[in-house]
Amino acid sequence: QLLFLGVEWERKGGQIALDTFYTLQKRGLPVQLTIIGCVPPVAITDTNITIIPFINKNNAAEASRLYSIFLNSDLLLLPTRAECAGIVFCEASAFGVPSITTNTGGVGTYVEDGINGFALPFSAGADAYADTITRLFADDENYRQLCISSRKKYETELNWDSWGKKFNSIAEKILNQ
């Protein structure tokens, strides 16, 4: 169960995610892809792909649907082309869902290789993403540990309480100068 979550298809690397899905299928992996937040600009007829154009997290029923999707996802696949603050990586980690993404912009502050996912080079294409995913699913214990450490990273770093404490510490240092 792969999850692609993003409003801007091109900027979030939607085509790379879609090509990764097809590459995994060609390799014989029984994958499914859920796309949330946009409608791909290409025709999609594969019944293993679900497209949800929009989910309003301010609506309790829709938020519950999103949480259910996270709970049933194995990986967040977001080969983003540009990213400054990827809150989606925090959300994925909160559910123990590792992220497979791109090491660009601020992504490295959210996704730590081998801890809560993997951030591939900007030049990586669908084959590299598929290779990473294939390796993960070839080793159940490694994948399970990655899920556990994803949740732990959320609990210790990728949450609003941790952000507030860090921000408060920085503000105090500035004010005390």
Image (tube, rainbow, N blue to C red):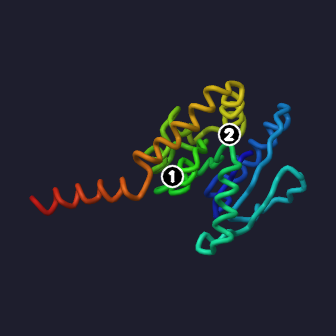
160 is higher (above) or lower (below) than 152? below
Q: Is residue 37 left or right of residue 102?
A: right
Residue 90's disc is 1
Q: Secondary structure at mark 1?
A: helix
Which of 109/128 is in front? 109
Q: Residue at x 76, y 61 (%)?
A: 40
Q: Residue at x 86, y 57 (%)?
A: 44
Q: Amino acid at mark 1?
A: Cys
**At which x and y percent is residue 48?**
85, 49
Q: Is residue 154 left or right of residue 13?
A: left
**At which x and y percent is residue 155?**
44, 47
**At which x and y percent is residue 139?**
67, 24
Please say whether residue 47 is visible from this viewpoint. Answer: yes
Of label 2 and label 1, which has the lower sequence position?
1
Q: Which residue is mark 2?
A: 125
102 is higher (above) or lower (below) than 49? above
Q: Residue at x 21, y 61 (%)?
A: 171
Badge count:
2
Q: Residue at x 73, y 57 (%)?
A: 35
